[in-house]
Image: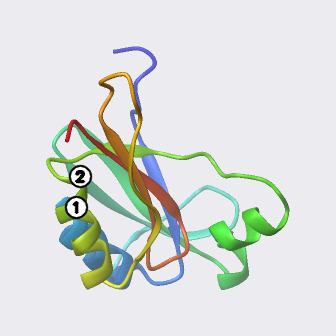
Amino acid sequence: MIGQIWWLEVPCKSVPRAAAFYAAVLGWKCPDPEKGNPAPAPGVATAHPFNCGMLNGAFAKMASDDDVASVADAANQGRMPVLATYLVASIDDTLAKVEEAGGRVHVPKTEIGGNMGFFARFIDTEGNLQGIWATK
């Protein structure tokens, strides 16, 4: 459908670490985190495809660790990166998985109001800010 996320790239310093984190937290499958495909995008050394249901994307191994902009960098400059938010069955269970897999909670479970459910945000092992949403 037009306007929906078709492809998601997650910049990272360590693809095996990022792949293990997202497999544990959101069930993403990256068939070969050790060997990726050459990437035509500037600054990206290799692309390592992953999928989960209808979501497809790649872990983008950056050519230099300095090319990974962490959420801390964005916060220091008063800017927020584009934020993807993923549907989960349980905010509490998912945040526990985040911490078990080496990430950290950035915004704890928060009620949106108006019967619109709850959200939370976490920082992955590569410094990327991600969101999660659930009805309860």
Instruction: Say which of 25 and 40 sits in front.
Output: 25
Q: Is residue 42 above or below residue 97?
A: above
Picture disc at residue 51 = 2
Residue 47 in which image quadrant: bottom left
Q: Say which residue appears at 17% left-offset and 52% top-offset.
A: 90
> In the rendering, which numbered label is found on residue 92?
1
Nearer the N terminus, badge 1 or badge 2?
A: 2
In the rendered structure, the answer to whether residue 69 lies left or right of residue 77 reads left
Quick one: label 1, few (<14), some, or many (20+) residues within 10 Å? some
Question: Does residue 3 show up?
Answer: yes
Closer mark to the observer between disc 1 and disc 2: 1
Q: Secondary structure at mark 1?
A: helix
Amino acid identity at mark 1: Asp
Label 2 is placed on what type of residue?
Answer: Asn
Residue 76 in the figure: left or right of residue 125: right
Residue at 74% across / 64% down in the picture?
75
Query: Helix, strand, or loop for circle 2?
Result: strand
Please say if 24 is above or below 135.
below
**Viewed as shown, does residue 51 lie left or right of 47?**
left
Residue at figure coordinates x 53%, y 66% from the top left: 128
Q: CA distance from mark 1 to mark 2?
A: 23 Å
- Please say whether residue 28 is visible from this viewpoint: no
Question: Depth check: 95 or 7 in front?
Answer: 95
Q: Position of residue 87 (x, y in %)?
A: 26, 42
89 or 50, which lies in front? 89
Q: Count all numbered tags in the image, as a single digit.
A: 2
Residue at figure coordinates x 29%, y 67% from the top left? 95
Quarter where residue 115 is shown: top left
| Residue 76 image point, x, y percent | 81, 69
Which disc is residue 114 wearing? none
User: Could you tell me residue 81's position as x and y percent?
Assistant: 66, 52
- Of 102 and 36, which appears nearest the observer? 102
